[in-house]
C-alpha cells in the first residue's frame, strides 16, 4: 500500500555498478515520497543521499567458496535479518538483491517482510541453473511477489531456473538521461592531455581491472591496429600491473587513467568509441548506457551484458567473441571511416533517451513493488 516502508537489504564486499545503481534507485524512490530504508554493512555507500541507512552485517555473499560456512551460519544470519526487519516495522516491501538474502528471506513470515521483491542485477550463476541448487532457487522465488531483471539476458537465466516468465519484469538501470550531455570542452582538454590529434581514433575502456573482465582482449587488439589509434583504459583493480605489462610493447599508444566515477561524461566525450569487454556475470553495464547518451558508439567483445542494449546500426558486438583479431578489424573500420562514430553515436543517443526514460523506469519499479508515488 502507498506509504508502506520499503526496506532494501544490500550487504556486500564490493562497491560495483549494481550496488551504486540500487542506491540511485532508492534515492529516486525517496524523491517520489516513499519511506525507504537501506540495510547494509557499508553505510557510506549512501553518503550524500537522503536514503536512511541501518547497519547490519550478514557475512559474505553466497559463492562456491562460502556456501559451506554460510550453511552452518544460516540460522544466525536468519535471526539477524529478522531482528533488522522487526526494527523497521511496519515493512510494506522487502527488496532483495543477493542470493543469500533472497533464499533466507523466503523462510521468514510475511508479517516481518511484507511483500518480497527480488532484483536481479545480472545473470543467475550457472551453478543455480541446474540440479538441486536450481530447485532451491525456484522454490524460494515462489515467495517473491515479482522479480525485476536488469536485462533480457538476465531474465532468460531466471527463467532457466524454473521461474515463470510472467513473474519477471525487465527494467533497465535508472539513469537521469536528460542530465547527460556530450562535454565538448572536456573532449578538447583530455585529448590534448593524452596526446591525441584531431584525427586520432581514441578508443576508451571503462572497467574494473579483474581477471574475469576481458581487458586482455582489448589490449591484444592493438597488435593488429596500425595508424593513428590510441587506447585509454580507465579503472582500478588487482590486475592493473599485469595489464600494464601486457600493454608495454605498445608504448604511448596505450594509456591508463584512474577510475572515472564522478567525471565519466568528460572521459567518454573525449573518446570516439567505447570498447566493452564483459565478464560472464554482466547485467546492464552503466558504462554502455552512459557512452550512448554522450553519443559514443559501443563495441562489445561479447554479447553478455550488451544484448538488447546496443541498437542496430549504433555499435557492434564482435564475432568471434573475445577475439582480439576480430576486435581489431572492427576498430579499424571506425579508424578508416571517421564519420562513422558520429553517425552511430547520434543514433545511440536518440535510442537510449527513449529506452531509459527515468519516469518510465520508476513507474515500472513501483508497479513491481506494488506501491504508488506519493509526490
Image: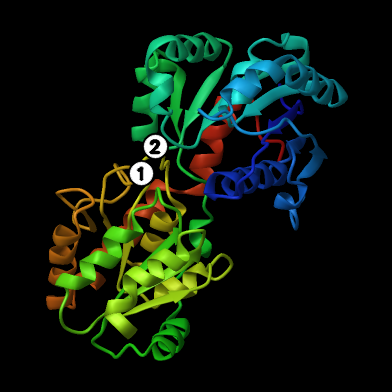
Q: Quadrant of residue 296?
A: bottom left
- Is the residue 288 above or below the residue 263 in the image? above
Which residue bears the numbered disc 1?
Answer: 305
Badge 2 crowding class, 10 Å Cα cut-off, few under 14, some 14 to 19, many 20 or more, is many
Q: Element under label 1?
A: loop
Note whether 302 is above or below 82 in the view shown: below
User: Viewed as shown, does residue 9 lie left or right of 315?
Assistant: right
Residue position marked by numbered label 2 in the rendering? 151
Q: Nearer the viewer, mark 2 or mark 1?
A: 1
Q: Position of residue 128 (x, y in %)?
A: 43, 21
Q: Is residue 194 visible?
A: yes
Marks 2 & 1, CB-CB < 8 Å contact? yes
Looking at the picture, tell me which residue is in the foreground, 186 or 74: 74
Task: Please name the residue shown 15% across and 63% down the image.
Answer: 330
**Quadrant where the C terminus is found in the figure:** top right
Q: Is residue 298 left or right of residue 88?
A: left
- Closer to the N terminus: mark 2 or mark 1? 2
Look at 56% across and 26% down and name the residue there: 99
| Residue 117 appears in the figure | no
Measured as percent of width and height from the top left, residue 197 is found at 29, 91
Coordinates of residue 365 in the picture (x, y in percent): 55, 33
Name of the residue lying farthest toward the right? 87
Amino acid at each position: 500500500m502507498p506509504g508502506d516502508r520499503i526496506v532494501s537489504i544490500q550487504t556486500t564486499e564490493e562497491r560495483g555498478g549494481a550496488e551504486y545503481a540500487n542506491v540511485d534507485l532508492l534515492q529516486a524512490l525517496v524523491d517520489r515520497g516513499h519511506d525507504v530504508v537501506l540495510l547494509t554493512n557499508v553505510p557510506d555507500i549512501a553518503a550524500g543521499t537522503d536514503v536512511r541507512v541501518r547497519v547490519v552485517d550478514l557475512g559474505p555473499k553466497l559463492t562456491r567458496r562460502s556456501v559451506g560456512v554460510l550453511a552452518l551460519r544460516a540460522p544466525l544470519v536468519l535471526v539477524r535479518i529478522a531482528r533488522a526487519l522487526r526494527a523497521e516495522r511496519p515493512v510494506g516491501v522487502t527488496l532483495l538483491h543477493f542470493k543469500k538474502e533472497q533464499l533466507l528471506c523466503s523462510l521468514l513470515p510475511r508479517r516481518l517482510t511484507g511483500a518480497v521483491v527480488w532484483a536481479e542485477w545480472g545473470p543467475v550463476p550457472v551453478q543455480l541453473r541446474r540440479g538441486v541448487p536450481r530447485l532451491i532457487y525456484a522454490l524460494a522465488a515462489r515467495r517473491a511477489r515479482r522479480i525485476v531483471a536488469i536485462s533480457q539476458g538476465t531474465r532468460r537465466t531466471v527463467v532457466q531456473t524454473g521461474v515463470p516468465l510472467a513473474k519477471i519484469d525487465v527494467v533497465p538501470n535508472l539513469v537521469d538521461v536528460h542530465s547527460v550531455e556530450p562535454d565538448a570542452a572536456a573532449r578538447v582538454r583530455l585529448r590534448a592531455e593524452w596526446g591525441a590529434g584531431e584525427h586520432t581514433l581514441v578508443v576508451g575502456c571503462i572497467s574494473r581491472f579483474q581477471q574475469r573482465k576481458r581487458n586482455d582482449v582489448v589490449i591484444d587488439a592493438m597488435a593488429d591496429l596500425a595508424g593513428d589509434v590510441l587506447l585509454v583504459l580507465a579503472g582500478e583493480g588487482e590486475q592493473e600491473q599485469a595489464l600494464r605489462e601486457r600493454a608495454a610493447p605498445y608504448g604511448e599508444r596505450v594509456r591508463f587513467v584512474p577510475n572515472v566515477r564522478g567525471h565519466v561524461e568528460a572521459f567518454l566525450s573525449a573518446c570516439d568509441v567505447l570498447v566493452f569487454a564483459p565478464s560472464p556475470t554482466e547485467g546492464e553495464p552503466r558504462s554502455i548506457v552512459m557512452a550512448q547518451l554522450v553519443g559514443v558508439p559501443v563495441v562489445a567483445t561479447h554479447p553478455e551484458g550488451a544484448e538488447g542494449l546496443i541498437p542496430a546500426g549504433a555499435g557492434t558486438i564482435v564475432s568471434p567473441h573475445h577475439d582480439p583479431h576480430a576486435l581489431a578489424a572492427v576498430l579499424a573500420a571506425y579508424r578508416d571511416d571517421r564519420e562513422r562514430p558520429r553517425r552511430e553515436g547520434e543514433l545511440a543517443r536518440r535510442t537510449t533517451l527513449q529506452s531509459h526514460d527515468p519516469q518510465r523506469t520508476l513507474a515500472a519499479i513501483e508497479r513491481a513493488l506494488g506501491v504508488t508515488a506519493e509526490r
